[in-house]
Image (cartoon, grey):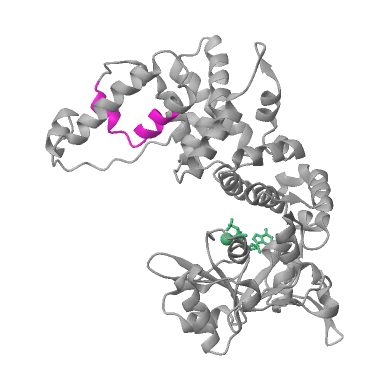
């Protein structure tokens, strides 16, 4: 194996097929089809990123990403089921029955590009050169859309362990950034100066935390220091992207470990200032322990292959906080239902400027909390209507997981489950009669009233 820490001087380390032992049987057949077709048409093509990392670690990759020197247009001409996506950078999505293979053209290393500048033409007029790569005043990359070499493509990636490529032409692994050594040592290290890389894209900090926790790796010293130093700047990333990345973290199966790292580094407090302060304080002399317990429950469920819907996840994690907020509103004389609405609205108002919870998820979160009272009434009023709700399982699961230690919960859940089981066994027509639904009557379409009661308060 050729090893080398300084790719600029000696070129990349190449690990031959015999040396790395990754079998193609572990790869997605569709990804292999894409790679072979690109190769057979004279293009360079490799698997890259997380899938190579995971294959080397003996983990099952989540997705298989392909890079090539073919332009998106050339890729489209080779695959009938190809759609080009992305405005910031054009990517080819090759659609197969059960998966989409993403094909990217080699990208250049953004930080090597000159800033946009005014250039002179004909010695007379000045015109603005089209800015390929644009950074804001703080060095955050806003746009970067030119093609590059395989090496540039590898070195613009986030971490050394994410920059390995599997070359289909000779089945070798190409390591431009020292990723193999870090992989065997269990280290998460940014490619290049971590302070610069986190400044360019603060979301990389969340990715560093996720990979460290998920792979059981330690953060390289300089990377860890830079992360703590830049923790406050996480809120510069766009709120929808931060929500997506937080979801990945919380549903990774290592949410508890990630949360510890996020809290120690200061990132958690930057993203959830009010909730974080509440979590660190006590209420009536009791610490707030439910958040940690719920993270562990969610992790266990994910690790067993189970799923958790987004509203249920948020209800489990923030339910105790919401209950306390609602209690404060009730103490001021607000009715129960309204107090839950107000508490949810206040919570969303605190969180959404940084981590943008989609409206539909916010409403569904409120409903899970608000419907808990309904579970308390047994026998319930019109139980079939309640059971027919789309979020019935989430409502039940919230009660079971978050409030399981409360009095009579088991008895109540048992009653509701029995009702649901009975309903499942009824023929649909009987069921419709029972819940009073009009049979085969055409529904008049009504415009939905905007739900004003949950508007975010700033
Ligand atoms: P997983 O899919 O298992 O979560 P991954 O490493 O494949 O992990 P993706 O989000 O699928 O993560 O990204 C694919 C690859 O793209 C990464 O391995 C990395 O090389 C690169 N990448 C992703 N996000 C960034 C980023 N913010 N900055 C630089 N490179 C990135
Ligand atoms: Mg991936």
Is residue 387 located in the magenta-colored stretch of the structure?
yes
Residue 125 position by quadrant = bottom right
Expressed as whole percent of the image width and height from the top left, the position of residue 456 reads 56, 33
Quadrant of the image for the C terminus? top right
Which region of the structure is painted magenta?
382-398
Q: Can residue 455 be seen at all in this image of the molecule?
A: no
Q: Quadrant of ligand 1?
A: bottom right
Q: Nearer the viewer, residue 344 or 378?
A: 378
Q: Residue at position x 46%, y 40% from top?
A: 308
Expressed as whole percent of the image width and height from the top left, the position of residue 69 reads 62, 81
Q: Compared to 391, does 288 lie above or below?
A: above
Q: Compared to 355, does 422 lie above or below?
A: above
Residue 409 position by quadrant = top left
Q: Nearer the viewer, residue 90 or 248?
A: 248
In this rendering, position of residue 402 left or right of residue 119: left
In this rendering, position of residue 446 left or right of residue 430: right
Q: Can residue 306 be seen at all in this image of the molecule?
A: yes
Quadrant of the image for the N terminus? bottom right
Expressed as whole percent of the image width and height from the top left, the position of residue 363 reads 46, 34
Q: Residue at position x 67%, y 63% from top?
A: 162
Q: Residue at position x 62%, y 37% from top?
A: 256
């Amino acid at each position: 194996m050729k090893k080398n820490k300084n790719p600029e001087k000696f070129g990349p380390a190449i690990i031959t097929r015999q040396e790395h032992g990754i079998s193609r049987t572990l790869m997605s057949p569709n990804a292999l089809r894409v790679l072979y077709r690109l190769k057979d048409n004279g293009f360079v093509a490799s698997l890259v990123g997380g899938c190579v990392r995971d294959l080397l670690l003996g983990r099952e990759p989540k997705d298989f990403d392909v890079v090539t020197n073919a332009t998106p247009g050339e890729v489209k001409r080779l695959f009938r089921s190809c759609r080009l996506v992305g405005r910031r950078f054009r990517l080819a999505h090759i659609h197969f029955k059960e998966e989409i293979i993403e094909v990217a053209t080699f990208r250049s290393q953004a930080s090597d590009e000159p800033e946009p500048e005014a250039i002179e033409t004909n010695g007379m007029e000045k015109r603005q050169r089209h800015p390929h790569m644009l950074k804001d005043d703080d060095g955050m990359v806003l746009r970067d859309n030119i093609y590059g070499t395989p090496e540039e493509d590898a070195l613009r990636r986030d971490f050394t362990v994410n920059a390995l490529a599997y070359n289909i032409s000779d089945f070798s692994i190409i390591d431009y950034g020292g990723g193999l050594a870090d992989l065997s040592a269990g280290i998460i290290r940014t490619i290049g100066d971590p302070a610069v890389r986190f400044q360019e894209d603060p979301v990389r900090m969340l990715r560093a935390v996720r990979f460290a926790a998920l792979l059981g790796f330690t953060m390289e010293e300089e990377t860890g220091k830079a992360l703590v130093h830049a923790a406050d700047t996480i809120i510069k990333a766009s709120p929808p992207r931060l929500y997506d990345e937080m979801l990945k973290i919380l549903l990774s199966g290592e949410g508890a470990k990630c949360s510890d790292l996020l809290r120690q580094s200061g990132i958690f407090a930057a993203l959830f200032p009010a909730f974080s302060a509440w979590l660190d304080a006590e209420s009536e002399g009791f610490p707030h322990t439910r958040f940690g317990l719920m993270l562990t429950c969610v992790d266990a469920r994910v690790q067993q292959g189970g799923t958790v819907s987004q509203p249920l996840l948020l209800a489990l994690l923030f339910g105790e906080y919401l209950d306390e907020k609602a209690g404060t509103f009730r103490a001021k004389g607000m009715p129960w239902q309204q107090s839950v609405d107000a508490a949810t609205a206040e919570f969303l108002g605190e969180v959404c400027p940084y981590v943008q919870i989609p409206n539909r998820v916010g409403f569904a979160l409120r409903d899970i909390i608000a419907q808990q009272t309904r579970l308390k009434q047994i026998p319930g009023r019109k139980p079939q209507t309640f059971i027919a709700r789309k979020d019935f399982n989430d409502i039940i699961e919230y009660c079971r997981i978050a409030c399981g230690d409360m009095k009579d919960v088991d008895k109540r859940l048992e009653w509701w489950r029995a009702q649901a089981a009975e309903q499942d066994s009824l023929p649909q027509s009987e069921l419709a009669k029972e819940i009073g639904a009009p049979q085969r009557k055409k529904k008049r379409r009504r415009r939905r009233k905007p739900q004003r009661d949950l508007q975010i308060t700033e």
